Image (spheres, helix red, strand yellow):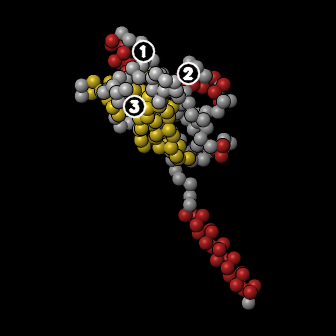
Amino acid sequence: MNLFRLTLTMGGLGLLASGLSSCLSEPTYSSTPVIEFASINPIRVAPKVSGGQPVDSVLITIRYQDGDGDLGLSAADQKLPQYTFPSRFSKNYFIEPLLKVGNKYQSLATIDSLAGNTAYVRGGYYGTFDRITSLTDNKSAPIKGTLTRNINFGYGDVFTAGQTVRFRVSIADRALHVSNVITTDSIVIKPR
């Protein structure tokens, strides 16, 4: 009788496992990354020395999905020709600040070039993120998750109190596919 119950239980568990695995098929995502805006959080970091200036930071979080999982660059990747400076792909997280002027948002690159300033350098807010997971290093697999980028800037370096700012964001994968471009919500730079 116990052998019968054991066989019945094992058979039932086997059917349950095969039934569940057929329900859990791999998602189908594009091999070009797709991103969505998740959040933007301004943070002020207190000065480390008495009388020093605080540093402002903005944390930008996006949601991503990629069909072949080739997001992020390792230290070894960054030595390959397609990922070395001056290639645009020496960075893989692209951020462009937009400043509200009147009722419209303008790129800081446009504003500075019109004013003859050189404070803002296109690509100055670009960054690099590491490979997302080692599970996809040797095989193609769909992935999704979130990425958060921290941008630090000194008060008055680029933005001043009361200005309204938002950011355009995109990412690239190792195959040099560039994602869609998203725009963050707006934030207002706080006074000191």
Q: Nearer the viewer, residue 25 or 64?
A: 64
Could you tell me if residue 15 is visible in this image?
Answer: yes
In which quadrant will I find the N terminus? bottom right
The answer to whether residue 141 is left or right of residue 110 is right
Residue 153, given in percent of the width and then of the height, sits at 45, 25
**Residue under pointer 1:** 119
Earlier in the chain: of badge 3 and badge 2, it is: 2
**Residue under pointer 2:** 87
The answer to whether residue 108 is left or right of residue 70 is left
Q: CA distance from mark 2 to mark 1?
A: 22 Å
Q: CA distance from mark 3 to mark 2?
A: 22 Å
Q: Nearer the viewer, residue 178 or 133?
A: 133
Q: Is residue 134 above or below residue 90?
A: below
Earlier in the chain: of badge 2 and badge 1, it is: 2
Q: Please tell me which residue is depicted at 47% across the width and 31% down the height of the picture.
A: 45
**Residue under pointer 3:** 167
Q: Amino acid at mark 3?
A: Phe
Q: Is residue 169 above or below residue 107?
A: below
Say what secondary structure mark 1 lies in: loop
Q: Residues within 10 Å of mark 1 (few under 14, many from 20)?
A: few
